[in-house]
Amino acid sequence: MDQSPDFWRTEVFHPLSVHFPIALLLVAFLFKLIALGSIKEVWKQGGTVLLILGTIGIWIAIYTGDLADGIVSRTICDPTALKDHENMAYITAWLFTFSLLLDLLKFSKFQTITKQKKLLSFFCILALTIGSGYLMYVGHLGATLVYQQGAGVYKPSVDCAEFN
């Protein structure tokens, strides 16, 4: 691991980029659930905007995670935990991408039948539900990597001489 204690360590970009999509995607799911029982369009449209931003963000988090992988994998005791985190993150990203595509299909001019829109909404909510479960599990795996294995954590020398 690069021992420089500054912002520009590659493995630092992943935790910086991962927290926004987690929040955005979970709140998008909440908005979409509220929209089911509300006649106000703000919940549907707000959920769609959050889903777009969160889906873009999750792919950025995947990219930065790939950047950190080569550095972090050399410092942890159990590389299978890192691989599980990565694999589950890809599944999660694809679930939210699928959900976004279903959600955007509802806005296409080819979707005029109410029954089809309800079916798309059902599958969108189903994908969001499963995706949110995976998202929480991926976050748990990430926390395990950081707090149990010290992934990406800078370990200063005993006398902290590099900070003088």
Image (cartoon, rainbow, N blue to C red):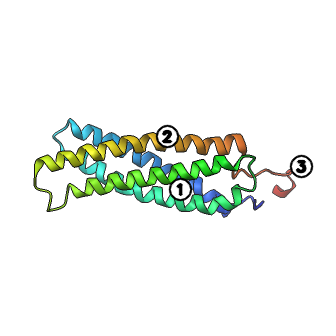
Relative height, residue 143 to residue 1 (above, below): above
Is 113 on the left-hand or right-hand side of 146?
left
Considering the image in quadrants, where does the N terminus appear?
Answer: bottom right
Per the model, the C-alpha gap separating discs 3 and 2 is: 38 Å
Q: Is residue 7 visible?
A: no
Q: Judge from the rendering whether residue 125 lies leftward or rightward of residue 153; answer left or right.
A: left
Q: Depth-wise, is mark 3 or mark 2 nearer the camera?
A: 2
Count neighbours of disc 2 (C-alpha within 10 A) and say few if under 14, some if 14 to 19, many if 20 or more. some
Kindly identify the amino acid type of the residue bearing the numbered disc 1. Answer: Ser
* Circle 3 crowding by C-alpha within 10 Å: few under 14, some 14–19, many from 20: few
- Image x and y of residue 32, in percent: 29, 43
Residue 95 circle label: none
Label 1's element?
Answer: helix
Q: How would you rate the neighbour count of disc 1 (Cα within 10 Å): few for under 14, some for 14-19, many for 20 or more?
A: some
Q: Earlier in the sequence, mark 3 or mark 2?
A: 2
Q: Which residue is rendered at x = 44% and y = 39% of the image? A: 133
Residue 86 in the image, given as x and y percentages of width and height: 57, 53
> Badge 3 is on which residue?
159
Q: Quadrant of the C terminus?
A: bottom right
Q: Which residue is mark 2?
A: 136
Point out residue 45 in the picture as x, y percentages from the top left corner: 25, 51
Instruction: Establish if 10 lies above or below 84.
Output: below
Check disc 3 and report its element: helix, strand or loop: loop
Identify which residue is drawn at 87% across, 55% down.
161
For residue 56, what is the image quadrant?
bottom left
Disc sitting over residue 17 in the figure:
1
For the question of whether residue 90 can be seen, the reply is yes
Tag in front: 1 or 3: 1
User: What residue is rendered at 35% in x and 57% in y?
Assistant: 52
Q: In the image, which is nearer the foreground, mark 2 or mark 1?
A: 2
Q: Are marks 3 and 2 in contact (CB under 8 Å)?
A: no
SS under mark 2: helix
